[in-house]
Amino acid sequence: MLQKIRDYSVICLIGSVGYSLLEILWRGFTHWTMAATGGLCLTLLYRLDQKHSREGLFLRCLKGATLITAVEFLVGCLVNRLLKWQVWDYSNSFGNLLGQVCPLYSLLWFFLCIPVYRLTGSLRQLFRRT
């Protein structure tokens, strides 16, 4: 039990830091809610990859991009629409949904899942050894 808590804490921390760094590189800034979102997303992607590791990479990336887009939509509805913190706004982006998500970023998440699944596979191997 303690091993799993440690493993998922490491995954969540990597996701939090990684997501925040991506935001800083892409937009020049981030928000603490993006760190929390990143931790949740990587944890969910780890589980998804764990359960579907035998599926093709294309299908796993499609599932991963859908998962991240769904999480971002839910977080966006909470922090941007309900709490009015204005962390991001995609209202001017093509195909946006309530200004919270758009097809462009879903496509980028699809491609980002390729290295992420390499990371999750490496983490699974590492956690098996410890």
Image: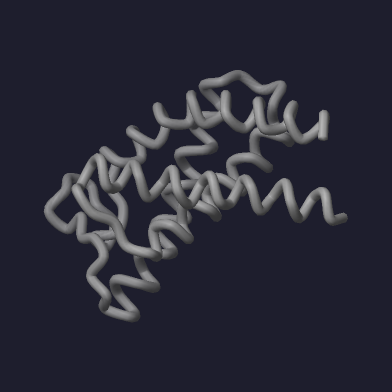
Q: Residue at x 35, y 44 (%)?
A: 21
Where is residue 123 drawn, in percent x and y?
A: 67, 32
Locate the N terminus by quadrant.
Answer: bottom right
Residue reaching furthest to the left: 92
In the displayed structure image, the side of residue 25 where residue 43 appears, left or right: right
* Frontmost residue, 91 versus 5: 5
Residue reaching furthest to the front: 130
Where is residue 36 drawn, in percent x and y?
A: 48, 61
Color encoding of the figure:
one colour
Where is residue 84 drawn, in percent x and y?
A: 26, 78
* Frontmost residue, 130 versus 104: 130
Residue reaching furthest to the top: 56
Number of dots carrying numbers: 0
In the rendered image, the vertical position of residue 77 relative to residue 126, given as above or below? below
Locate the C terminus by quadrant.
Answer: top right
In the displayed structure image, the side of residue 26 where residue 42 appears, left or right: right
Residue reaching furthest to the right: 1
In the displayed structure image, the side of residue 109 where residue 118 appears, left or right: right
In the rendered image, the vertical position of residue 128 relative to residue 86, given as above or below? above
Residue 82 quadrant: bottom left
In the displayed structure image, the side of residue 13 where residue 98 appears, left or right: left
Q: Residue at x 51, y 46 (%)?
A: 15
Q: Residue at x 32, y 62 (%)?
A: 31
Q: Residue at x 66, y 22 (%)?
A: 55
